[in-house]
C-alpha cells in the first residue's frame, strides 16, 4: 500500500467514525435521525475504489471492536450483540460494491445506482442481523415486517437523500481532483 492509499484509507475510516456522531434530524414524524456513516462509506467506495474503500470500512469496524468508542453507542467486542452491528459489518461489502459499480461512472445516474446497490447490500446484511439479535438474543418477538420497517423503511428517505448529495459531491470531486484520486 502506497503512502497516498494509506492516508486516504485512514482518512475515510476516520470520516466514517465521525459520521457516526453527525446526526441530521428529518422534520417528519416517525423518521429517525440520519447519521453520515453510509455517506462516507459511499464516498470511500466511489473515490478510493472497491479495494481501498472496503479496507477503510474494515479499519473502522475493527477499531471499534478493539474498544475505541467510535460506534454510535461506544465500542468493544460486546458490540456484536447490538442490533445495529450487522449494519456496521455491512459497510465493508457495501463500499466494495459501490467501488466496483462506480469505477467508471461519469454521470449522475450510473453513480447513484451504484451507490443504491451498495445501500441494498447494507440493508441485506444489517436487517437480518438486527432481526436475529432482536428476536433470538433479546427475545423481542418482532415480525419480519416490523424488522424490515425498523431496519430499512424508516431510514430509506434519509438514505436516498445521502445518495443524491454523495453522488453530486463525488462527481464534483472526481472532476476537480482526478490526479490526487488516480489509482487511489
Image (cartoon, rainbow, N blue to C red):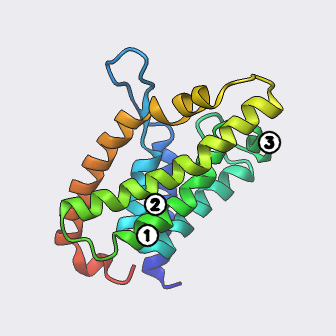
Residue for badge 3: 78
The tag earlier along the polypeptide, 1 or 3, is: 1
Q: Is residue 82 visible?
A: no
Q: Position of residue 114 (x, y in %)?
A: 35, 62
- Asked whether the beta carbons under mark 2 and mark 3 sit within 8 Å of each other, the answer is no
Q: Quadrant of residue 175?
A: bottom left
Instruction: Report the disc number at residue 8.
Output: 1
Residue for badge 2: 12
| Label 3 neighbour load within 10 Å: few <14, some 14-19, many 20+ | few
Q: Secondary structure at mark 2?
A: helix
| Label 1 neighbour load within 10 Å: few <14, some 14-19, many 20+ | some
In this picture, is 145 found above or below 113?
above
- Asked whether the beta carbons under mark 1 and mark 2 sit within 8 Å of each other, the answer is yes
At x 63%, y 55%, the residue is: 61
**Is 5 or 104 nearer to us in this picture?**
104
Farthest residue toward the top? 29
The tag earlier along the polypeptide, 2 or 3, is: 2
Amino acid at each position: 500500500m502506497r503512502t497516498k492509499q494509506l492516508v486516504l484509507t485512514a482518512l475515510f475510516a476516520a470520516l466514517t467514525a465521525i459520521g457516526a456522531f453527525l446526526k441530521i434530524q428529518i422534520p417528519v414524524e416517525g423518521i429517525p435521525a440520519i447519521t453520515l456513516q453510509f455517506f462516507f462509506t459511499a464516498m470511500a467506495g466511489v473515490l478510493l475504489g472497491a479495494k481501498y474503500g472496503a479496507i477503510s470500512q474494515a479499519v473502522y469496524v475493527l477499531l471499534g471492536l478493539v474498544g475505541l468508542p467510535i460506534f454510535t453507542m461506544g465500542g468493544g467486542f460486546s458490540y456484536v450483540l447490538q442490533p445495529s452491528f450487522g449494519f456496521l459489518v455491512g459497510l465493508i461489502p457495501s463500499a466494495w460494491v459501490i467501488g466496483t459499480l462506480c469505477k467508471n461512472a461519469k454521470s449522475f445516474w450510473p453513480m447513484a445506482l451504484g451507490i443504491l446497490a451498495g445501500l441494498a447490500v447494507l440493508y441485506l446484511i444489517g436487517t437480518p442481523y438486527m432481526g436475529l439479535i432482536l428476536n433470538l438474543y433479546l427475545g423481542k418477538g418482532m415480525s419480519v415486517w416490523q424488522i424490515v420497517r425498523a431496519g430499512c423503511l424508516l431510514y430509506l428517505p434519509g438514505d436516498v437523500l445521502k445518495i443524491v448529495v454523495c453522488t453530486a459531491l463525488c462527481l464534483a470531486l472526481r472532476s476537480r481532483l482526478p490526479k490526487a484520486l488516480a489509482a487511489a
